[in-house]
Amino acid sequence: MLLERAAGLAERIERYQKLKVAAKEADLVSTRAAQIGEAAALLTQARAALGRFSKASINVQYAPAGVQELTERAQRLRTIAAEDPAGLASPPFNVAHEFTNRLRGLAVAANQSIEEGWSRFVAENTPSGSDDVLEALGKLPQMRAGVTRIRQCRQKVSALAAAVPADPASTIEQLRVLSAEHGSAWAELTADSVPPSVLQFLRACAAEGAPVTTLTDEVRVWLESRGLLGSFRVRIG
């Protein structure tokens, strides 16, 4: 009787051990599937974003590394899953370090490239200029309203540039509207008491910069008499 009980216990222990091993393998397979699924989702999102920016004619400089090697490993995992899914528990390479982490890295690199491309696009396609000059112009009561409009346009542009848009085509249209409004504000920035040569100089300085030859005696005297001369700097263009 004791031998029979011992034999039965040994059999139950063996079945338990087998079930334990099978459960562990099932957990590993489930973990592998989750890891691969998460990485694939990130890549899918990055690919969709790259497509949207390409369609909107925004240049994104992105060159994924190690694609051939990762493709081969993906094919190997697909083969294992088709032949014996349990084989995913112990594939011939480290799935986390040599596959899924690298897939996530590709997605992260793609998103960084998109951010850089977007910042570059905004910088190249929207108005810029010296905030110092605007500060100086804002001291003139007759120019204060126009300067406020220009600042508001620049603030809105900065806000759009700060975040990668989900819909770049729509955001580009917003930037075009703001650029047009910015130009209109400059065109309307006039003052009856400001000589034309001074006004032309101020507009140029606050936009892309004014040639030093435009700093005539008339302009210099006008700026100096109003305490604005120190607000301007000479730089090599």
Image (tube, helix red, strand yellow):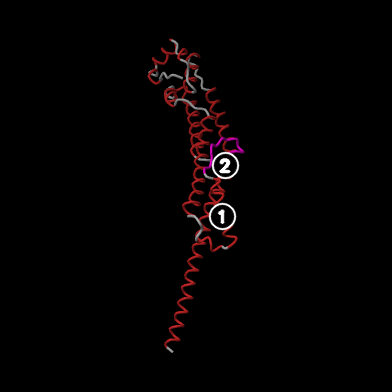
- Nearer mark to the viewer, of 2 and 1: 1
- Name the amino acid type tagged 2: Leu
The furthest residue to the top: 217
**Front-most of residues 91 and 161:** 91
Residue at 49 percent across and 13 percent down: it is 197
Q: Secondary structure at mark 2?
A: helix
Q: Secondary structure at mark 1?
A: helix
Name which quarter of the figure residue 81 lies in. Answer: bottom right
- The residue carrying mark 2 is 50
Answer above or below: position of 53 versus 37. Answer: above
Q: CA distance from mark 2 to mark 1?
A: 27 Å
Residue at 47 percent across and 54 percent down: it is 96
Q: Is residue 11 left or right of residue 84?
A: left
Q: Is residue 153 left or right of residue 228?
A: right
- Name the amino acid type tagged 1: Arg
Q: Residues within 10 Å of mark 1 (few under 14, many from 20)?
A: some
**Front-most of residues 212 and 88:** 88
Residue at 55 percent across and 37 percent down: it is 60
Answer above or below: position of 190 versus 21. Answer: above
Q: Which stretch did the figure color magenta?
A: 49-65
Answer above or below: position of 65 versus 188. Answer: below
Answer above or below: position of 237 versus 19. Answer: above
Q: Which mark is residue 76?
A: 1
